[in-house]
Amino acid sequence: MTYKNIKICACLAAAMCSCFAAGCAGSDKKDTSSALTTTAPVIESKTDTADTDNSVVQAESAADESSQAEPKKEFTPGEGLEKTAALFSGAYTYKTEVTYSDEAAGNVSEVTQASDGKNFYQNNKSVTESGFAEDFTYLRSGDKSYYIDNNTSAFTSKTSAEELNIYQAIIDQQLDVTSTHIPEDTEGCKVEEYTYTGDTYITVYDLYFSKKTGDIKKYTATYITEGDDDIIQTVKVKEITDSADEKLFDTDFTEDMTDFDNISEDTRLGFCQGVCATYNISTDDMYKMDITTDDLKRISFDKFFELVCTYAKPKK
């Protein structure tokens, strides 16, 4: 997933649940932050965008008061949606592959989410346009939340971390049940469609369920913004189970990683310069984001890893 779309995930996730994500901040991608998504943690996430409940749709509803002037039809969730949302009520592991229609074929982000009913974990792995393999994690363990960049072994503490669950969010926000966007080829699946209509944009969710088992197979989110080309996010479900590995919520990693929030300016400068050297980020790249070498002493975690997500190249 490119940095631009990681950011979509992050914005969507943030709007949706005031949390994650999944990656870095800032993007030239069109603003879809009022749409609903599942990836995201994040991370303020690039990529990601990595990414859970209390949706973006809440932001949408608040932003579009005019649409609420008319009485809303009674909402009845489809059988597939209701069944899938229930899977996230306790412990679970949920693995997906995410692609975007405006990216080259083969650009896939792998997202793993897990919860034991109390703690939450999300990991995003993807490859940027330059070939850099991103790997970041968002973790809520007990009363602490972290965003971790696994490539550089650095983390920052976050104040909150909600889970990204698009399925429950659709139910909670009672999106319109529609059928206008369902394709002719449903890949042998039963499709349920839910739509949010704002002032200048529409977000359509098509959920694909197995006709035999009723299990979720994938969903697409189509972001339709006035004056822009549509972007289609496709999320394929690779695994969904009712258990989680407790090791995922362990915070011992903090002992061996760099706590970006609690290091001196000189230490931060040295750390950032080392990362830039390792991943071939030049001063010209820094200047494109209005970052000078001296700025690295005081740069925020989000800003620095936006730089990394955007300009890092594979190690030489």
Image (cartoon, rainbow, N blue to C red):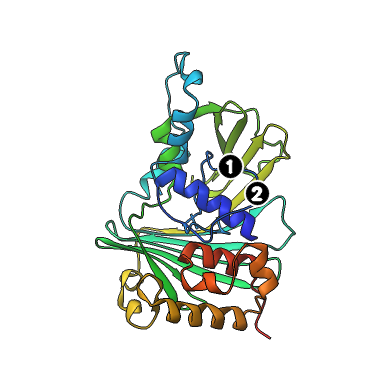
Left or right of 121: which side holds 142? Answer: left
Q: How many marks?
A: 2
Specify the farthest residue to the bottom.
316
Q: Quadrant of residue 158?
A: bottom left
The answer to whether one can see residue 215 in this image is no
- Label 1 is placed on what type of residue? Thr
| Residue position for label 1 | 32
Please state, as top left, top right, bottom left or bottom right, where the C terminus lies in the image.
bottom right
Q: Residue furthest toward the front? A: 294
> Residue 147: x and y, percent?
42, 65
Q: Give whichever of 207, 145 is nearer the camera.
A: 145
The spot of residue 210 in percent (x, y) is 54, 46
Residue 49 relative to residue 168: left or right: right
User: Is residue 125 in sight in this rendering?
Assistant: yes
Disc 2 marks which amino acid? Lys
Residue at numbered disc 2: 29
Which residue occupies 69% across, 37% down? 183
- Residue nearest the observer in this picture, 153 or 40: 153
The Cα–Cα distance between marks 1 and 2, rounded to whole angstroms, is: 8 Å
Image quarter for residue 190? top right
**Secondary structure at numbered mark 2:** loop
Image spot of residue 202 (x, y percent):
60, 32
Residue found 62% across the figure and 62% down from its top: 290
